[in-house]
Image (cartoon, grey):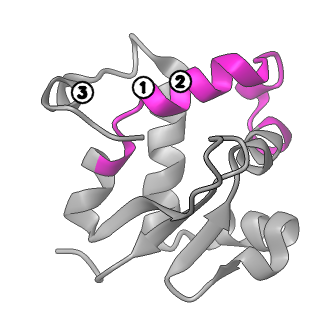
Amino acid sequence: MAARDDDVNFTAASEPLSAVLVEFFRKVAAGDEEIYGQLRSRFKSQVGGDRFYFTLPELYAFMTEQYEMFRDVDYRRFRKALFKAPINAALQPMGALVVIIENKRKVDQTLYALERRSSGP
């Protein structure tokens, strides 16, 4: 989820899974009503205020439920696409970031959050 300078040149054609993940997080950061409804149904108390809390296995389960293109993607491929995607580079101009809330020393057990730190530009 960390972006390098060369990640900013990322294109949807080269990495379709990563592109969908970036767009998903952009919608969450923007407060998209439809996405928030889906998140509240799935994550209940993990969604609210300026944060959306998740673990990678929870996010994977959600994405496979909500996005058909993820249904044939195994967890390892999902995780690779997630870490390759320039999510924070896309969110930063909106005043949002994906951050580690509780580091469990294993990425699959670590608790992450998308934080909206401001209303953006």
> Which residue is labeled 3 in the image?
7
Q: Which residue is mark 2?
A: 81
Residue flagged by tag 1: what amino acid is it?
Lys
Q: Secondary structure at mark 1?
A: helix
In front: 106, or 66?
106
| Tag shown at residue 1 | none
Percent from the top left, x then y, of residue 31? 50, 74
Q: Nearer the viewer, residue 26 or 4?
A: 4
Q: Marks 2 and 3, how far apart in space?
A: 12 Å
Which callout, 1 or 3, points at the residue further toward the start of the chain?
3
* Mark 2 or mark 3, earlier in chain: 3
Principal secondary structure, stretch drawn in magenta: helix
Q: Which residue is mark 1?
A: 84
Quadrant showing the N terminus: top left
Mark 1 near mark 2, Cβ–Cβ under 8 Å?
yes
Residue sitting nearer the eye, 37 or 98: 98
Name the residue at 43% across, 55% down. 26
Looking at the figure, which quarter contains the C terminus? Answer: bottom left
Answer whether residue 22 is magenta in the image.
no
In this view, the residue farthest toward the front is: 105
Residue 118 at x, y percent in the picture: 29, 83
Measured Cα–Cα span from mark 1 to mark 2: 5 Å
Decide if residue 110 is on the left or right side of residue 90.
right
- Tell me if residue 17 comes above or below residue 34 in the rendering: above
In the depicted structure, whether residue 3 falls above or below residue 101: above
* Kind of element beneath mark 3: helix
State the extent of the magenta-drawn residues as a range.
64-88
The amino acid on which the numbered mark 2 sits, given as a three-letter code, is: Ala
Q: Are marks 1 and 3 in contact (CB under 8 Å)?
A: yes
